[in-house]
Amino acid sequence: MSAEDRLTRALGAPAAPAKDMRFTLEVMRKAEAARFRAETGRRLLHGAAIAGLAVAALAPLGVWAGDNADTALDLALSAGGAVAMLSLLRALRRPRPAWR
Amino acid sequence: MTDDDEARLVADARRGDARAFSRLVDAHQQKVRGFLRRFAGHWADADDLAQEAFVIAWAKLGRFEGRSSFCSWVCGVGYRIARDARRSHARAGARDFTWLEEQDDVGAGAPLEDRLAVARAMAALPDDQRAAVALCLSEGFSHAEAAAILGMPLGTVKSHVTRGRERLLKMLEASDER
């Protein structure tokens, strides 16, 4: 057999193994892991951006509360009372289970 | 798998259908793995690279324009990963031809000595030449497909294939004389 034929045969010999389901499963597992990492990173960035905005918005309020402590306390107590009243009303309006 | 089937699976996978993508991986894994085994030389690395290529393809499927086949596109992704990995880790020396010994001569269609000699000769070719030879002479891609995969002009791919083949032939003949 000539060297040409031998080269053609050697180059044409299959290099890949038979189809392997484990290969496909491993690809899908890695793809899901990569997608999860990307999603977690995106959520972390989103959370950090919102936290930054909240701090930037609340900083002037903190300064004002420091200067007007009595008014700030009154406002905080009024807000707390309003939340408690609303919670009580919602609890009273909730339908009772039939077995009671 | 027909072109229509493939286009449908690609469209489904683009919408996030993991089952459609896994069918694409299943259909094309042999060709991608075969090409990367010939290109990277080290079969375990080649399978890792092939997996990485499919994972990147899944993440960047929106960029696939359908100008080439899905298989060609993934081979191109795999080629770039493998080439960059070789450059950064200098893996050229760590070649492993044991996978050739696992194939029986009848199934492979060529004697083991010839396959080993050609694999060693392939390792000595420059990256671009080896990739062109692996795609066109081993995996059955056309010159035009190989040009799209490697991102090279058609004439360059043809010349890489011709020169690569000549060099392999010379090395095979030299190995006989030893």
Image: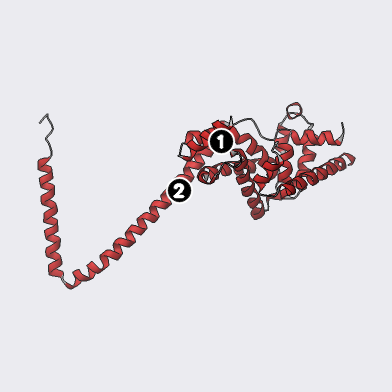
- Rendered image quadrant of residue A24: top right
Image quadrant assignment for residue B171: top right
| Cα–Cα gap, marks 1 and 2 | 21 Å
Q: Is residue B3 left or right of residue A16?
A: left
Q: Residues within 10 Å of mark 2 (few under 14, many from 20)?
A: few
Residue B86 visible at all: yes
- Residue B19 or A80: which is nearer the viewer? B19
Name the residue beneath numbered marker 1: B25
Question: B28 and B36: which one is in front?
Answer: B28
Can see residue B41?
Answer: no
Spot occupied by residue A4 in the image (x, y as percentages of width and height): 84, 36
Which residue is pictured at 30% across the width and 63% down the height? Answer: A55
The chain letter under disc 2 is: A
Report the side of A56 relative to B169 (left or right): left
Q: Identify the residue under disc 2.
A: A37
Amino acid under disc 1: Val
Label 1 Cα crowd, 10 Å radius (few <14 / some 14-19 / many 20+):
many
* Identity of the residue furthest to the top in this view: B106
Q: What amino acid is found at the position of numbered circle 2 in the picture?
A: Arg
Chain of the residue under the numbered disc 1 shown in the image: B
Q: Which mark is residue B102?
A: none
Instruction: Identify the element where label 1 is drawn.
Output: helix
For the residues bearing labels 1 and 2, Cβ distance under 8 angstroms: no
User: Callout 2: helix, strand or loop?
Assistant: helix
**Total numbered labels:** 2
Whether marks 1 and 2 lie on the same chain? no
